[in-house]
Amino acid sequence: MSDTPACSATTKAGKPCGKTVGTTPTPDGPRCASHRPQTRDPGARAPIRNPKTADDVRRLVTWAMIRAAEDQLSAPSANAVAGMARVWLRVNEDKTQQVVEAVFTALDAQQEMMRCMTVVEASRTRYGTAKEALQSALDRLHELTPGAKESDEDAVARETRQRDTERGTFGAAMDRIYMTTPSDEDVEDAEDADDAATD
Protein backbone atom coordinates (compact mmCIF):
# COMPACT_ATOMS: atom_id res chain seq x y z
CA MET A 1 0.00 0.00 0.00
CA SER A 2 1.25 3.50 -0.92
CA ASP A 3 1.60 6.43 1.51
CA THR A 4 0.57 8.86 -1.27
CA PRO A 5 -3.05 9.94 -0.92
CA ALA A 6 -5.32 9.19 -3.86
CA CYS A 7 -6.61 12.00 -6.07
CA SER A 8 -10.03 13.02 -4.76
CA ALA A 9 -11.20 14.81 -7.92
CA THR A 10 -14.31 13.61 -9.74
CA THR A 11 -13.88 12.27 -13.26
CA LYS A 12 -16.18 13.07 -16.21
CA ALA A 13 -17.99 9.80 -15.49
CA GLY A 14 -18.78 11.10 -11.97
CA LYS A 15 -16.51 8.66 -10.11
CA PRO A 16 -13.54 9.54 -7.85
CA CYS A 17 -10.23 9.62 -9.76
CA GLY A 18 -8.23 7.57 -7.24
CA LYS A 19 -4.79 7.96 -8.89
CA THR A 20 -1.96 7.85 -6.38
CA VAL A 21 1.00 8.52 -8.68
CA GLY A 22 2.22 12.12 -8.67
CA THR A 23 -0.54 13.54 -6.49
CA THR A 24 -0.03 16.92 -4.87
CA PRO A 25 -1.85 18.34 -1.85
CA THR A 26 -4.10 21.30 -2.78
CA PRO A 27 -6.70 23.29 -0.79
CA ASP A 28 -9.37 21.10 -2.49
CA GLY A 29 -7.61 17.86 -1.46
CA PRO A 30 -4.96 15.72 -3.18
CA ARG A 31 -4.87 16.09 -6.97
CA CYS A 32 -3.10 14.16 -9.75
CA ALA A 33 -1.42 15.94 -12.68
CA SER A 34 -4.63 15.75 -14.75
CA HIS A 35 -6.80 17.36 -12.07
CA ARG A 36 -4.34 19.81 -10.56
CA PRO A 37 -5.47 23.47 -10.96
CA GLN A 38 -3.50 25.18 -13.70
CA THR A 39 -1.87 28.45 -12.74
CA ARG A 40 -1.55 30.95 -15.56
CA ASP A 41 1.92 32.41 -16.05
CA PRO A 42 1.51 36.01 -17.32
CA GLY A 43 4.96 35.92 -18.94
CA ALA A 44 4.30 32.73 -20.87
CA ARG A 45 2.74 34.52 -23.84
CA ALA A 46 5.18 35.97 -26.37
CA PRO A 47 5.05 39.80 -26.49
CA ILE A 48 4.85 39.80 -30.31
CA ARG A 49 2.52 37.51 -32.22
CA ASN A 50 3.31 38.73 -35.75
CA PRO A 51 6.71 40.44 -36.09
CA LYS A 52 6.77 43.16 -38.75
CA THR A 53 9.99 45.00 -37.93
CA ALA A 54 13.48 44.17 -36.71
CA ASP A 55 12.52 45.76 -33.36
CA ASP A 56 9.63 43.27 -33.06
CA VAL A 57 12.04 40.38 -33.66
CA ARG A 58 14.49 41.87 -31.15
CA ARG A 59 11.71 42.01 -28.50
CA LEU A 60 10.74 38.40 -29.22
CA VAL A 61 14.34 37.16 -28.94
CA THR A 62 14.86 39.14 -25.71
CA TRP A 63 11.69 37.58 -24.27
CA ALA A 64 12.94 34.08 -25.22
CA MET A 65 16.36 34.73 -23.67
CA ILE A 66 14.84 35.88 -20.37
CA ARG A 67 12.37 32.96 -20.25
CA ALA A 68 15.18 30.47 -21.01
CA ALA A 69 17.45 32.03 -18.35
CA GLU A 70 14.63 31.73 -15.78
CA ASP A 71 14.14 28.08 -16.80
CA GLN A 72 10.65 28.90 -18.08
CA LEU A 73 11.41 28.02 -21.72
CA SER A 74 13.09 24.82 -22.86
CA ALA A 75 16.41 24.96 -24.71
CA PRO A 76 14.89 23.51 -27.93
CA SER A 77 12.14 26.14 -27.85
CA ALA A 78 14.66 28.93 -27.27
CA ASN A 79 16.80 27.61 -30.14
CA ALA A 80 13.70 27.49 -32.38
CA VAL A 81 12.93 31.15 -31.59
CA ALA A 82 16.56 32.12 -32.36
CA GLY A 83 16.49 30.17 -35.64
CA MET A 84 13.22 31.75 -36.74
CA ALA A 85 14.59 35.20 -35.86
CA ARG A 86 17.67 34.59 -38.05
CA VAL A 87 15.49 33.47 -40.96
CA TRP A 88 13.13 36.46 -40.56
CA LEU A 89 16.04 38.91 -40.54
CA ARG A 90 17.61 37.29 -43.63
CA VAL A 91 14.32 37.34 -45.54
CA ASN A 92 13.61 40.97 -44.64
CA GLU A 93 17.18 42.19 -45.17
CA ASP A 94 16.48 42.69 -48.89
CA LYS A 95 13.43 44.84 -48.15
CA THR A 96 15.42 46.95 -45.67
CA GLN A 97 18.10 47.51 -48.30
CA GLN A 98 15.45 48.53 -50.83
CA VAL A 99 14.00 51.06 -48.37
CA VAL A 100 17.45 52.53 -47.76
CA GLU A 101 18.12 52.76 -51.52
CA ALA A 102 14.74 54.44 -52.11
CA VAL A 103 15.44 57.00 -49.35
CA PHE A 104 18.83 57.87 -50.86
CA THR A 105 17.32 58.14 -54.34
CA ALA A 106 14.69 60.54 -52.98
CA LEU A 107 17.34 62.60 -51.21
CA ASP A 108 19.51 62.78 -54.35
CA ALA A 109 16.53 63.96 -56.41
CA GLN A 110 15.61 66.54 -53.80
CA GLN A 111 19.18 67.88 -53.74
CA GLU A 112 19.12 68.17 -57.54
CA MET A 113 15.82 70.07 -57.32
CA MET A 114 17.34 72.44 -54.76
CA ARG A 115 20.31 73.09 -57.07
CA CYS A 116 17.86 74.07 -59.81
CA MET A 117 15.81 76.44 -57.67
CA THR A 118 17.23 79.45 -59.43
CA VAL A 119 14.95 78.94 -62.39
CA VAL A 120 16.99 79.34 -65.50
CA GLU A 121 15.49 77.99 -68.72
CA ALA A 122 18.34 75.47 -69.06
CA SER A 123 17.66 74.03 -65.59
CA ARG A 124 13.90 73.53 -66.08
CA THR A 125 14.44 70.15 -67.73
CA ARG A 126 16.83 69.02 -64.98
CA TYR A 127 14.34 70.23 -62.36
CA GLY A 128 11.49 68.28 -64.00
CA THR A 129 13.63 65.14 -64.22
CA ALA A 130 14.66 65.48 -60.57
CA LYS A 131 11.04 66.06 -59.53
CA GLU A 132 9.93 62.90 -61.36
CA ALA A 133 12.78 60.93 -59.75
CA LEU A 134 11.77 62.24 -56.30
CA GLN A 135 8.13 61.30 -56.85
CA SER A 136 9.14 57.87 -58.11
CA ALA A 137 11.38 57.29 -55.07
CA LEU A 138 8.64 58.42 -52.69
CA ASP A 139 6.14 56.12 -54.43
CA ARG A 140 8.61 53.24 -54.07
CA LEU A 141 9.03 54.04 -50.37
CA HIS A 142 5.26 53.95 -49.98
CA GLU A 143 5.14 50.51 -51.65
CA LEU A 144 7.86 49.19 -49.33
CA THR A 145 6.24 50.63 -46.20
CA PRO A 146 2.49 50.20 -46.72
CA GLY A 147 1.64 51.29 -43.16
CA ALA A 148 3.18 54.74 -43.63
CA LYS A 149 0.87 57.70 -43.17
CA GLU A 150 0.06 59.96 -46.10
CA SER A 151 -2.47 62.69 -46.68
CA ASP A 152 -5.52 62.10 -48.88
CA GLU A 153 -4.09 64.57 -51.39
CA ASP A 154 -0.79 62.64 -51.58
CA ALA A 155 -2.64 59.33 -51.93
CA VAL A 156 -4.70 60.65 -54.87
CA ALA A 157 -1.57 62.08 -56.53
CA ARG A 158 0.31 58.78 -56.06
CA GLU A 159 -2.59 56.78 -57.52
CA THR A 160 -2.77 59.16 -60.49
CA ARG A 161 0.96 58.73 -61.14
CA GLN A 162 0.62 54.94 -60.92
CA ARG A 163 -2.32 54.99 -63.34
CA ASP A 164 -0.37 57.22 -65.77
CA THR A 165 2.61 54.86 -65.55
CA GLU A 166 0.40 51.85 -66.25
CA ARG A 167 -1.30 53.56 -69.20
CA GLY A 168 1.97 54.84 -70.56
CA THR A 169 3.01 58.30 -71.64
CA PHE A 170 0.64 58.34 -74.64
CA GLY A 171 -2.46 57.94 -72.45
CA ALA A 172 -1.23 60.61 -70.03
CA ALA A 173 -0.51 62.98 -72.94
CA MET A 174 -3.99 62.40 -74.36
CA ASP A 175 -5.51 63.21 -70.96
CA ARG A 176 -3.54 66.46 -70.82
CA ILE A 177 -4.70 67.41 -74.32
CA TYR A 178 -8.29 66.61 -73.40
CA MET A 179 -8.02 68.61 -70.18
CA THR A 180 -6.60 71.64 -72.02
CA THR A 181 -9.06 71.47 -74.94
CA PRO A 182 -11.82 74.01 -74.28
CA SER A 183 -15.36 72.70 -73.91
CA ASP A 184 -18.23 73.97 -76.11
CA GLU A 185 -19.39 76.14 -73.21
CA ASP A 186 -15.92 77.69 -72.89
CA VAL A 187 -15.90 78.44 -76.64
CA GLU A 188 -19.35 80.06 -76.44
CA ASP A 189 -18.28 82.14 -73.41
CA ALA A 190 -15.17 83.29 -75.26
CA GLU A 191 -17.24 84.23 -78.34
CA ASP A 192 -19.69 86.15 -76.15
CA ALA A 193 -16.80 87.99 -74.53
CA ASP A 194 -15.38 88.85 -77.99
CA ASP A 195 -18.77 90.08 -79.14
CA ALA A 196 -19.14 92.23 -76.03
CA ALA A 197 -15.68 93.68 -76.55
CA THR A 198 -16.39 94.65 -80.15
CA ASP A 199 -19.74 96.33 -79.29
Image (cartoon, rainbow, N blue to C red):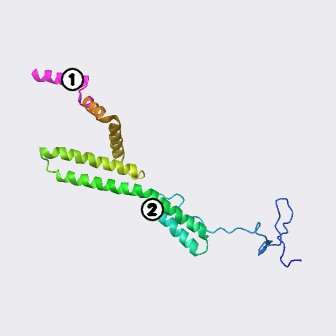
Hey, which residue is sitting farthest right in the picture? 1
Residue 42 is left or right of residue 180, and the answer is right
Left or right of residue 73: residue 57: left
Q: Is residue 178 above or below residue 112?
A: above
The amino acid beneath tag 1 is Val
Which residue sits at x=49%, y=63%? 86
Farthest left residue in view: 198
SS assignment at label 2: helix
Q: Nearer the viewer, residue 96 or 17?
A: 96
Q: Residues within 10 Å of mark 2 (few under 14, many from 20)?
A: some
Where's residue 78, x and y in %?
Answer: 57, 68
Vertical comparison of 25 with 11: above or below? below
- Which class describes the residues within 10 Å of circle 1: few (<14), some (14-19), or many (20+)? few
Q: Toward the viewer: 135 or 41? A: 135
Residue at 55% in and 68% down: 64
Residues rendered magenta in the picture: 178-199
Provide the secondary structure element on which disc 1 rests: helix
Residue at the spot 26% in from the left edge and 45% down from the top edge:
132
Label 2 or label 1, whichever lies nearer to me, is 2
- Numbered badge on residue 187: 1
Q: Which residue is mark 2?
A: 54
Name the image quarter holding the N terminus: bottom right
User: For this view, does 185 lie left or right of residue 26?
Assistant: left
Occupied quadrant, residue 31:
bottom right
Q: Nearer the viewer, residue 138 or 84?
A: 84
**C-alpha gap between disc 2 and disc 1:** 60 Å
Asked if residue 184 lies in the magenta stretch, the reply is: yes
